[in-house]
Image: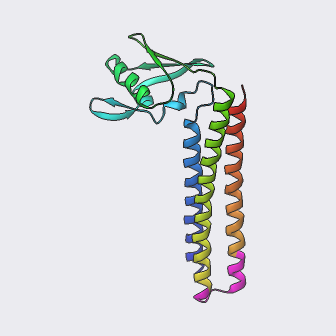
Amino acid sequence: MEEDLAMYAEMAEDSMNGALERLTRELSKVRTGKASPSMFNSVMADYYGSKTPIPQMANVNTADARTIVIQPWDKTALGAIEKAIFEANMGLTPQNDGEIIRISIPPLTEERRKDIGKQVKAYGEEAKVSIRNARKDLMNSIKQTVKDGYPEDMGKGKEADAQKLTDTYTGKVDKLVEAKTADIMTI
């Protein structure tokens, strides 16, 4: 029974960690008004018939705080990259000069910053829901194990451990959301 509980706890922690990783990925896509190559990690361009992330087919760098330069290894991919950026609906206009693509990141308005801040908080809440669902599953497993004969006082200890784990991951989510919100609101 002890091994089963350890396995359930490990599964719950993996699930919570997965929620945190998803949140980190989502937050990396959020535009902050500053140039960030990670904005293009999930933008897929058609490259010889298959959808490929832009960073796998080009160097994506920042020229300055508001300019991103994309230099494909294969110049024939310029059109596909440019099209993918338009289709990603990021509010960005790529400028193709035949060698590289330059993208100027326009400054965000105060209203847009607030909207993006709300979006970031929604991502954080989704992550917290996933974490709470993992805790619920773990708590149900603990309760079932106690019903099956595991000592009740040890079960209560395992429930307290599950709550500590949940609190730890919820705190990590709060820190990520807080940092991203501060980044967005910084002009």
Q: How is the image coloured?
A: rainbow
Identify the image quadrant of the N terminus. Answer: bottom right
40 above or below 117?
Answer: above
Q: What percent of the width, then of the height, locates residue 127? A: 60, 53
| Position of residue 179 in the picture relative to residue 14 (left or right) | right
The image quarter containing residue 82 is top left
Q: Which residue is depicted at the point 72% across and 43% down?
A: 178
Identify the image quadrant of the C terminus. Answer: top right
Q: What percent of the width, then of the height, locates residue 60? A: 49, 24
Q: Which residue is depicted at the point 60% across and 68% down?
A: 9
> Does the segment drawn in magenta span residue 154?
yes
Residue that extends furthest to the bottom in the rendered view of this protein: 149
- For the residue pair 56 and 104, the one nearer the viewer reads as 104
Q: Which residue is depicted at the point 59% across and 76% down?
A: 140
- For the residue pair 185 and 142, the one nearer the viewer reads as 185
Residue span colored magenta: 147-157
> Does the segment drawn in magenta span residue 116?
no
154 above or below 7?
Answer: below
Q: What percent of the width, then of the height, locates residue 117? A: 66, 39
How many numbered marks, from 0 up? 0
- For the residue pair 71 and 111, the one nearer the viewer reads as 111
Q: Main secondary structure of the magenta part?
A: helix
- For the residue pair 90 and 57, the one nearer the viewer reads as 90
| Position of residue 47 in the picture relative to residue 71 (left or right) | left
The image quarter containing residue 85 is top left
Q: Which residue is depicted at the point 72% across and 53% down?
A: 171
Residue that extends furthest to the left in the rendered view of this protein: 49
121 above or below 63?
Answer: below
Q: What percent of the width, then of the height, locates residue 14? A: 56, 59
| Position of residue 156 in the picture relative to residue 63 (left or right) | right
